[in-house]
Image: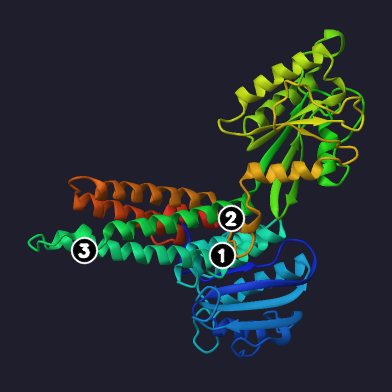
C-alpha cells in the first residue's frame, strides 16, 4: 500500500558517512508531544536550544541542538523538528529510531500515540511537501536538487537564483500576460453579438508578438541555464597514438589516462568532467580507432571491445573532437585512414552534432601546418606544451552554445523546461498564424493560447501530471 501523503515523516537529512554534525528531521502535524518526549521540554519557535536527546528511560543518546519550526513557517509548511547531533552514522540511526519509537508510544497526557503513523520519508518527500503546501513551486523545488548536485560554482549560483524564484518570476510574468490576451479573446466568444473588431481594437497582434519576444528571451536564457546544469558530452576520437589521452590530461590538468608510445594503450573509456567558464564538459577519452593491429594482425578481444565502446559514445556525443597526428599527415596510409575515420565519425555521430578536427603534436611536427585538405576551421595544438589549448576551450564553449555574457543573473534550467518552452512557442506561433489569416478563427486562437499557458504551467507545477511529479521528487536524496 502506498504511504499516505499526510503521514508525518522522518529521515536523516545529512549525507551518509561521518561528520562533525548530522541532522535528523521530522515533519508533520502537531509535533509538540514528540518534542517533549525527545527533548524533555517544549522548544521556543525558531530558536536553537542545546540539550540532551532522550531515550525512553530518560538517558541521553547524545547532546546537540534542537530547533522547532511551527507550521506554516517552515520548509515543508508543516511543523518541523530538526535535531542536530554529532555526525556519526550510528548516533544518527539511534536518534532516528528513537523518533519512530517515541511517536508510537502513548502520550501521558492523552493516552494516545504521540504522533501516529510516523514513517521514514521517501527520497525528496520533504521538498515534495514544500511544493504541495505552496512553499515552493516546481521549478524552485527542482532547484533544491540542482543546488545540491551543482558541479561548478556557476551552476550553484544559477541554482540558487532559480531557488529564489528568478526563473519562476519570468514564467509567471509571461503567464499573466498570456491570461490577459486569453481573456480578451474569450470575451469575443462570449459576446458574439458585440460587433467589435477584436483583432484591431485589442491590439491582439501586438500583444501576441510581445509574448513571443518575451518567450524567445526566456528560451535563450533557459538554454544557457541547461548548459550550466547538464553540460555537454565531448568525445575525443582518432587513430591510436594521436594523443587523445594526452589531450584529456591537458584539459583536466591531471594525469588521468595512461600515456605511452604503444598503440592501443587506452583500452576502455576514461571520463572526466572539467569546467570552462563554469560550464561542465564531460570529456571522454576513447580507444584508438583502427581496423587491424601491427602488420595487419587481428585486434585482440579487449581492444575490440574498447573500439566498440568508442563508437557507442560517439553515437551519443554532443560534440566530437576528431584528433589527427600532425607528425604523420605526410604518410599516405595514415592520411587515408584519417579520411576513412572522418567519414565514419560524420556518419555515426548524431545528426547535427559538431565534429571538430584537431591537429595535435604541433611541438614535434617538422611542418606544423595541416594538409591542404584539412577543414578551414581545424585547430592546431600541442597537448604536451599546452599550445592552442585556450583556443580549443573557446571553441568548445562555442560548440556548446555558451554566451560569455550570460553568466550574470542566469538561472539553472532542465531539459523538461526547454521542452515545455518549445511547446509554448509552437502554440504561440500557431496563434499568430490564426491572427494573420484572412478569416481568423477566434475559437482556435483561444485554444492555442490555452495550450501555451498549460505548457508554461508545467514548468512551475500548475499543470504538471502527478506521475511526472513522482519521478521528479524520487530523484532527490532522502532527507531532502
Residue highlighted by disc 1: 162
Whether residue 101 is visible to the viewer of this picture, yes or no, is: yes
Q: Secondary structure at mark 1?
A: helix
Residue highlighted by disc 2: 225
**Rendering coords of residue 71 (x, y %):** 50, 81
- Figure check: 90 above or below 307: below
Q: CA distance from mark 2 to mark 1?
A: 10 Å
User: Dot 3: within a 10 Å radius of its alpha carbon, few (fewer than 14), some, or many (20 or more) residues?
Assistant: few
**Rendering coords of residue 227 (x, y %):** 62, 50
CB under 8 Å between callouts 2 and 1? yes
Give whichever of discs 3 and 2 has the lower sequence position.
3
Q: Secondary structure at mark 3?
A: helix
Residue highlighted by disc 3: 201
Whether residue 477 is visible to the viewer of this picture, yes or no, is: no
- Considering depth in this image, is 330 or 166 the residue closer to the camera? 330
Q: Quadrant of residue 375?
A: top right
Amino acid at each position: 500500500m502506498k504511504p499516505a501523503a499526510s503521514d508525518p515523516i522522518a529521515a536523516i537529512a545529512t549525507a551518509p558517512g561521518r561528520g562533525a554534525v548530522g541532522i535528523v528531521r521530522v515533519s508533520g502535524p502537531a509535533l509538540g508531544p514528540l518534542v517533549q518526549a525527545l527533548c524533555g521540554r517544549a522548544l521556543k519557535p525558531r530558536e536553537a536550544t542545546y540539550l540532551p536527546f532522550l531515550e525512553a528511560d530518560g538517558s541521553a543518546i547524545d547532546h546537540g541542538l534542537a530547533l522547532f519550526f511551527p507550521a506554516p513557517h517552515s520548509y515543508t509548511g508543516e511543523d518541523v523538528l530538526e535535531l542536530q547531533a554529532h555526525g556519526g552514522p550510528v548516533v544518527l540511526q539511534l536518534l532516528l529510531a528513537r523518533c519512530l519509537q517515541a511517536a508510537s508510544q502513548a502520550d501521558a497526557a492523552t493516552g494516545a500515540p504521540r504522533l501516529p503513523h510516523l514513517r521514514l520519508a521517501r527520497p525528496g518527500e520533504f521538498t515534495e511537501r514544500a511544493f504541495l503546501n505552496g512553499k515552493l513551486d516546481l521549478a524552485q523545488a527542482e532547484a533544491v536538487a540542482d543546488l545540491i548536485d551543482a558541479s561548478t560554482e556557476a551552476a550553484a549560483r544559477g541554482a540558487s537564483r532559480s531557488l529564489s524564484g528568478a526563473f519562476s518570476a519570468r514564467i509567471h510574468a509571461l503567464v499573466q500576460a498570456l491570461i490577459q490576451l486569453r481573456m480578451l479573446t474569450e470575451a469575443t466568444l462570449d459576446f458574439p453579438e458585440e460587433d467589435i473588431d477584436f483583432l484591431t481594437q485589442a491590439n491582439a497582434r501586438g500583444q501576441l508578438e510581445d509574448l513571443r519576444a518575451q518567450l524567445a528571451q526566456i528560451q535563450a536564457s533557459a538554454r544557457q541555464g541547461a548548459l550550466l546544469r547538464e553540460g555537454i558530452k565531448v568525445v575525443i576520437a582518432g587513430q591510436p597514438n594521436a594523443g587523445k589521452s594526452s589531450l584529456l590530461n591537458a584539459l583536466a590538468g591531471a594525469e588521468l589516462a595512461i600515456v605511452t608510445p604503444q598503440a592501443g594503450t587506452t583500452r576502455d573509456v576514461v571520463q572526466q568532467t572539467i569546467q570552462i567558464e563554469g560550464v561542465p564538459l564531460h570529456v571522454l577519452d576513447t580507444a584508438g580507432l583502427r581496423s587491424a593491429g601491427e602488420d595487419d594482425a587481428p585486434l585482440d578481444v579487449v581492444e575490440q571491445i574498447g573500439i566498440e565502446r568508442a563508437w557507442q559514445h560517439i553515437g551519443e556525443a554532443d560534440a566530437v573532437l576528431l584528433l589527427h597526428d600532425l607528425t604523420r599527415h605526410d604518410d599516405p596510409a595514415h592520411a587515408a585512414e584519417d579520411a576513412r575515420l572522418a567519414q565514419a565519425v560524420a556518419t555515426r555521430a548524431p545528426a547535427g552534432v559538431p565534429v571538430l578536427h584537431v591537429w595535435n603534436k604541433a611541438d614535434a611536427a617538422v611542418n606544423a601546418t595541416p594538409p591542404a585538405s584539412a577543414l578551414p576551421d581545424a585547430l592546431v595544438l600541442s597537448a604536451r606544451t599546452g599550445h592552442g589549448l585556450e583556443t580549443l576551450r573557446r571553441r568548445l564553449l562555442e560548440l556548446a552554445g555558451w554566451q560569455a555574457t550570460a553568466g550574470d543573473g542566469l538561472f539553472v534550467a532542465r531539459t523538461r523546461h526547454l521542452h515545455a518552452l518549445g511547446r509554448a512557442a509552437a502554440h504561440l506561433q500557431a496563434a499568430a498564424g490564426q491572427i494573420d489569416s484572412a478569416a481568423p478563427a477566434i475559437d482556435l486562437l483561444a485554444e492555442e493560447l490555452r495550450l501555451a499557458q498549460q505548457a508554461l504551467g508545467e514548468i512551475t507545477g500548475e499543470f504538471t501530471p502527478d506521475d511526472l511529479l513522482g519521478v521528479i521528487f524520487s530523484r532527490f536524496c532522502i532527507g531532502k
